[in-house]
Amino acid sequence: MSNKSHSCSSRRQAIKTTIAAGAAGLAASAGLLSFSGVSFAAALTKERRDAMSPDDVIAMLQKGNERFRAGKMEQHDYLAQKRASATGQYPAAAILSCIDSRTPAEILMDMGLGETFNARVAGNICNDDIVGSLEFACAAAGSKVILVMGHTACGAVKGAIDNVKLGKLTGLLDEIQPAVKATKYDGDRTSKNAEFVDLVAANNVRRSIEEIRDESEVLAKLEKEGKIKIVGAMYHLSDGRLEILG
């Protein structure tokens, strides 16, 4: 190759590198979620979060789950997100889910640091501490959605169905008993019946939602005003699908 040709090739490569770097910088400053498959957004900003409606936030969570299921998750720069969120956080949603090791909500919905509040307790039950935490998330910190997420083959639900007695767990499982009793089912009503277990788990999600509304005037008022939405979902262990409950 001649020196002239080599020089032209070098200039072209330099121009491409400059354009790519500039585009990456624009993506980061604009808060875009991805560019060429790499996440440049350091953290969710207040402006971006406040510009979203509750329905936008629900759609964001669903799209994140679709990426998770497809194996096309964002390449999150967690160190950058850590630095960006160190002085403030603006999560769009608060997620109440089960302690089950297979159901980390922020991973299942492909969320980064600073994007969701996450409360986890066996059987995704509600109590005063959980409700108070959700009030903080929405009334104080500005989250737009409360998502109560149950899951299939839930061990806590199975324990409640079998009336398990074990230390402090006994009282926790008692909180799920109303969902067991409220589930209409003519077949085998034991923990060995996967269909019955999952029906109870879905009703347990609905019960938690009712408790949030009944126990918190703050959250009920925000929902009536359209400032937040309280929704339920079931996560399917078999295929990774997040099903929003009607």
Image (spheres, rainbow, N blue to C red):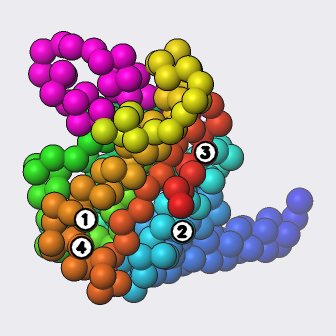
Residue matched to label 1: 213
State how far apart marks 2 and 4 are (Cα): 22 Å
Residue at 34% x, 20% y is 159
Q: Identify the amino acid type marked 2.
A: Ala
State how far apart marks 2 and 1 are (Cα): 22 Å
Residue matched to label 3: 241
Query: Relative to the observer, which residue lies in front, 34 or 116?
Result: 116
Q: Position of residue 21 (x, y in %)?
A: 54, 71
State how far apart marks 2 and 3 are (Cα): 14 Å
Front position among marks 2 and 4: 4
> Which contiguous range is marked in magenta?
151-177
Disc 4 crowd rating (10 Å Cα; few below 14, some 14-19, many 20+) is some
Mark sitting earlier along the chain (2/3): 2
Q: Identify the amino acid type marked 4.
A: Ala
Location of residue 31 with respect to 157 vertically, above or below:
below
Residue at 21% x, 63% y is 214
Q: Check disc 4 and report its element: helix, strand or loop.
A: helix
